[in-house]
């Protein structure tokens, strides 16, 4: 047996105060209420959820000059702080469940008289216990070692340490979590980083710089692949030369046509598989801010896993950097819809309530998949189950996680490995050209992996969503969803053939619909005019019962003749956040802004179009329900062929060496 480093104490690279709560905690622990004491009352649960999100901060400050290096920090005299944080607490339950490690050693080196170090552990219910302590006394410092078992962490729990200063400042020079591992697990694996980029040159070049600048990460890197699919190229960024010089031969920029995220990641997987020298391939978005230590931790965790495992990172909000977007994702089988895992509260702000105060964060969260904004896949898994499905975008990562699970390879979303990224809530892929891919790919994934004979609730829910889009005057989206269903019904044979051309076809197709014609200036649309403005506040959120009444009545309203004035003027301006079906369905026309805040479109109610789309929607959904068993068998039978390296080599041939791509 030999000693292997699992995790070390780290501090922020850029000393950004917004991210400090993810590394260092100066606040007290104020544990929230247990769900069993709250009970089953819906009102009580909602009240408790609101209380859980209330800030517990007292205003204590951590100053950037307390950061002495990447691994050292200073605690001022008479003050204390905790390293029970996202990046510095030790996620014991994940190591207990998924790896061969059954005990760890914490070694802390401090400098300063009168310093105290206290080690804590938590249980799955969030309660913490003191498990060890040490003091420097009159000595100038010391190194303290704590041997800690992982046995009590079956359901959840963390280890962490607090540091208290006496009459002098104390410097925590380092802290390391190590374990005794077999000799054949001592050497670390290596990783091919696969970044797909499309017209984000500065973002991508800065990401390459973050990877290149971390000296600790360099030995773990085999190759950094950049799949360049845009016209605004990363090599033209002013930040690229420095990253290229630092990475040297490790960096490879591979240009190809725009095959979407799935085409880019499949290229990275293919190159990694053919090269055969790296242990893992890491899928990573081009528009993230990376914590390089997270890559090292993911590789280390993967190296020591009981069986080959996909190791994913978490996503923090790039615009509000202490906010965790989600702590783990699952696919709900009955609906076949992705969502946060049970028990997870989305958009959690560590700047308002710390890890030690947040009960739900102490329970281990098990997932079905991890998004490919940061996801480490063993080369062994790729070799056995194949590459990404050719889906362009959406559902490629979730389908891959489900496919891996069925082959016996779990996915672990691992605390302490994370990136900052634009949160999904700032996007809306349900009402623009992306809706085609979203709907088609969800259906394909369900046909492949739904355990229910006819997809559970999915087809019925699809029809509900179709009606919602029609009631909302989103005729382009409704039409795109029907075209998506028609392609699914045609079978899996065309997925590869249409990958290079489908985006252009979809974007060209929607141009004919007024609700898809966007304008960046409000003056592009007529002013709001309405003969009888509503007497009610139209931005109010209706009750559940009122929504049910609207759901029954609004489709009937769509066949009535529109108000004459609405043919020339919008009846309202509706902000993206308010563009719900039950609000849009009241109008005969409206100017509706898009989620990204850059543009708007004019919606108009058209009864004839509504009738025709309703007819086709009903027929196609009935056909899909009838043919589901046959389609599911067909898609499953061809899955291994569609995702094989050979199939992808044919699709990528124009851009592979000797494939005939234009120079």
Image (tube, rainbow, N blue to C red):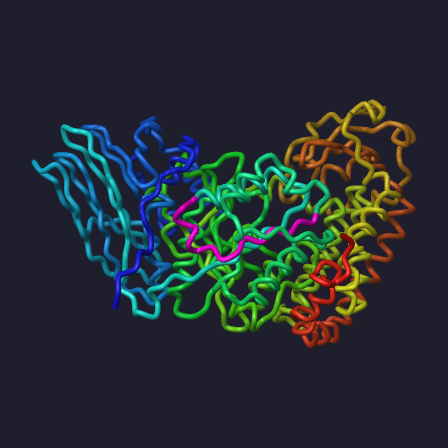
Please say whether residue 81 is visible from this viewpoint: yes
| Up-down relation of residue 416 to residue 449 (above or below) | above
Please say whether residue 32 is visible from this viewpoint: no
**Residue 322 point in image, percent of width and height:** 45, 37
* Extreme residue toward the left, this view: 138
Residue at 83%, 37% in the rendered image: 517
**Residue 226 point in image, percent of width and height:** 60, 51
**Residue 109 point in image, percent of width and height:** 21, 44
| Up-down relation of residue 537 to residue 609 (above or below) | above
Occupied quadrant, residue 188: bottom left
For residue 214, side relative to residue 566 (left or right): left
| Up-down relation of residue 395 to residue 536 (above or below) | below
Of 154 and 170, nearer the camera is 170
Q: Quadrant of the N terminus?
A: bottom left
For residue 322, side relative to residue 81 (left or right): right
**Residue 189 point in image, percent of width and height:** 42, 62
Of 599 and 239, nearer the camera is 239
Of 278 and 515, nearer the camera is 278
Of 430 and 304, nearer the camera is 304
**What span is in magenta?**
214-229
Residue at 30%, 42% in the rendered image: 83
For residue 647, side relative to residue 88 (left or right): right
Occupied quadrant, residue 494: bottom right
For residue 421: magenta?
no
Residue at 47%, 43% in the rendered image: 324
For residue 218: magenta?
yes
């Amino acid at each position: 047996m030999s000693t292997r480093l699992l995790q070390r104490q780290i501090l922020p690279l850029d000393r950004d105060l917004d991210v400090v709560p993810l590394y260092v905690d100066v606040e007290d622990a104020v544990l929230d209420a247990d769900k069993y004491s709250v009970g089953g009352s819906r009102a009580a649960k909602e009240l408790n959820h609101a209380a859980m999100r209330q800030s517990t901060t007292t205003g204590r400050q951590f100053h950037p000059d307390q950061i002495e290096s990447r691994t050292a920090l200073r605690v001022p005299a008479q003050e204390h702080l905790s390293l029970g944080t996202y990046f510095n607490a030790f996620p014991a339950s994940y190591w207990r469940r998924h790896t061969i490690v059954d005990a760890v050693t914490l070694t802390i080196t401090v400098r300063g008289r009168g310093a105290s170090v206290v080690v804590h552990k938590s249980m799955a219910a969030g309660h913490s216990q003191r498990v060890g302590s040490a003091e420097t006394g009159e000595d100038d410092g010391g190194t303290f070692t704590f041997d800690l078992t992982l046995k009590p962490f079956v359901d959840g729990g963390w280890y962490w340490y607090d540091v208290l200063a006496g009459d002098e400042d104390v410097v925590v020079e380092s802290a390391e979590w190590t374990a005794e591992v077999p000799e054949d697990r001592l050497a670390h694996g290596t990783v091919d980083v696969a970044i797909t980029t499309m017209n984000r040159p500065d973002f991508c070049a800065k990401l390459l710089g973050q990877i290149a600048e971390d000296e600790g990460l360099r030995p773990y890197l085999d190759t950094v692949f950049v799949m360049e699919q845009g016209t605004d190229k990363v090599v033209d960024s002013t930040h690229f030369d420095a990253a290229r010089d630092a990475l040297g031969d490790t960096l490879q920029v591979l240009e190809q046509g725009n095959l979407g995220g799935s085409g880019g990641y499949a290229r990275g997987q293919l190159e990694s598989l053919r090269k055969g020298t790296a242990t893992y391939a890491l899928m990573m978005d081009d528009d993230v801010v990376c914590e390089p230590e997270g890559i090292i931790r993911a590789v280390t965790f993967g190296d020591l896993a009981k069986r080959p495992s996909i190791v994913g990172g978490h996503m923090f909000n790039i615009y509000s950097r202490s906010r965790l977007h989600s702590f783990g994702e699952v696919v709900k089988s009955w609906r076949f819809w992705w969502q946060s895992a049970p028990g997870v509260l989305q958009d959690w702000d560590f700047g308002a309530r710390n890890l030690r105060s947040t009960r739900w964060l102490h329970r281990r969260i098990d997932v079905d998949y991890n998004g490919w904004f940061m996801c480490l896949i063993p080369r062994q898994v790729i070799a056995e189950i194949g590459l990404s499905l050719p889906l362009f975008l959406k559902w490629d990562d979730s389908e891959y996680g489900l496919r891996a699970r069925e082959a016996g390879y779990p996915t672990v979303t691992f605390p302490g490995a994370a990136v900052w990224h634009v949160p999904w809530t700032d996007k809306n892929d349900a009402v623009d050209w992306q809706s085609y891919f979203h709907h088609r790919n969800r259906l394909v994934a369900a046909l492949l992996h739904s355990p229910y004979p006819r997809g559970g609730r999915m087809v019925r829910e699809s029809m509900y969503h179709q009606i919602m889009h029609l009631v909302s005057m989103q005729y382009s989206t409704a039409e795109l969803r029907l075209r998506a269903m028609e392609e699914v019904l045609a079978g899996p044979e065309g997925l590869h053939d249409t990958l290079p051309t489908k985006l252009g076809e979809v974007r060209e197709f929607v141009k004919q619909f007024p609700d898809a014609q966007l304008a960046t200036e409000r003056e592009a649309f007529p002013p709001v005019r309405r003969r009888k403005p509503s007497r009610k506040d139209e931005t109010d959120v209706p009750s559940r019962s009122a929504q049910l009444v609207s759901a029954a009545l609004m489709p009937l309203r769509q066949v009535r003749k529109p108000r004459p004035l609405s043919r020339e003027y919008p009846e309202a301006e509706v902000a993206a956040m308010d563009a719900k079906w039950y609000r849009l369905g009241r109008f005969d026309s409206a100017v509706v802004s898009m989620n990204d805040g850059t543009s708007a479109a004019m919606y108009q109610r058209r009864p004839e179009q509504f009738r025709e789309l309703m007819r086709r929607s009903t027929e196609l959904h009935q056909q899909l329900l009838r043919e589901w068993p046959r389609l599911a068998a067909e898609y499953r039978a061809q899955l291994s062929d569609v995702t094989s390296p050979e199939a992808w080599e044919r699709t990528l041939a124009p851009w592979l060496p000797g494939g005939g791509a234009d120079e």
